[in-house]
Amino acid sequence: MLARPPLALAALAVALVVTACGGDSDTDRSTGPRSTGASESVTVVGENIRFDTTELTATAGQELEITFDNRDDGVPHNLHVRDTASGDAMTEITEGPVTQTLEVSFDQPGEFEYFCDVHPDRMAGTITVE
Ligand SMILES: [Cu+2]
């Protein structure tokens, strides 16, 4: 009977050390560089029938969340991205003001076009995937 409390304490001490180590590595993960599995995000504003950004970057194999902020009151726009890992990806053509999100990923490096289906000549850009 007398032997049990010290053993229990030893086990508790080991458990605390393990827990502390686990906590430390969690902290490292959240403050470290974003790596596999982490998603990237970016906002593209549509205003006066223009995209405010016509050059985006992404990493092959990583998800990119694009927020499209259509600020053109009463003007329909959408965001259409060519040749993503799952084919063309696009939001619905909707009159502004409206905010839409599109999640895309790319299998391999290269340059991929994005544009508005209503105004492809005026609203277009390139996503460079590394
Ligand atoms: Cu448009």
Image: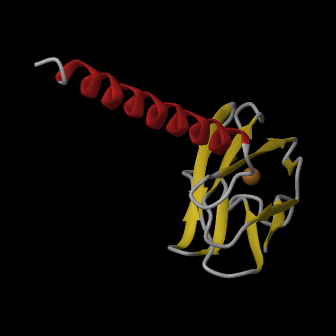
Q: Quadrant of residue 73?
A: top right
Query: Looking at the figure, which quarter contains the N terminus?
Result: top left
Q: Is residue 84 above or below residue 100?
A: below
Q: Is residue 36 above or below residue 25?
A: below
Q: Is residue 20 above or below residue 87?
A: above
Residue located at (77% from left, 59% from top): 119
Image mark count: 0
Q: Nearer the viewer, residue 92 or 17?
A: 17
* Residue 48 appears left or right of 91: right
Q: Residue furthest front?
A: 2
User: Percent x, y for residue 44?
Assistant: 78, 46
Q: Nearer the viewer, residue 18 or 70?
A: 18
Q: What colour scheme does the image use?
A: secondary structure
Residue located at (84% from left, 48% from top): 49
Q: Quadrant of residue 26?
A: top right
* Residue 13 appears left or right of 26: left
Residue located at (60% from left, 59% from top): 63
Query: Looking at the figure, which quarter contains the C terminus?
Result: bottom right
Q: Nearer the viewer, residue 80 or 22?
A: 22
User: Percent x, y for residue 3?
Assistant: 19, 24
User: Percent x, y for residue 66?
Assistant: 68, 50
Q: Quadrant of residue 126?
A: bottom right
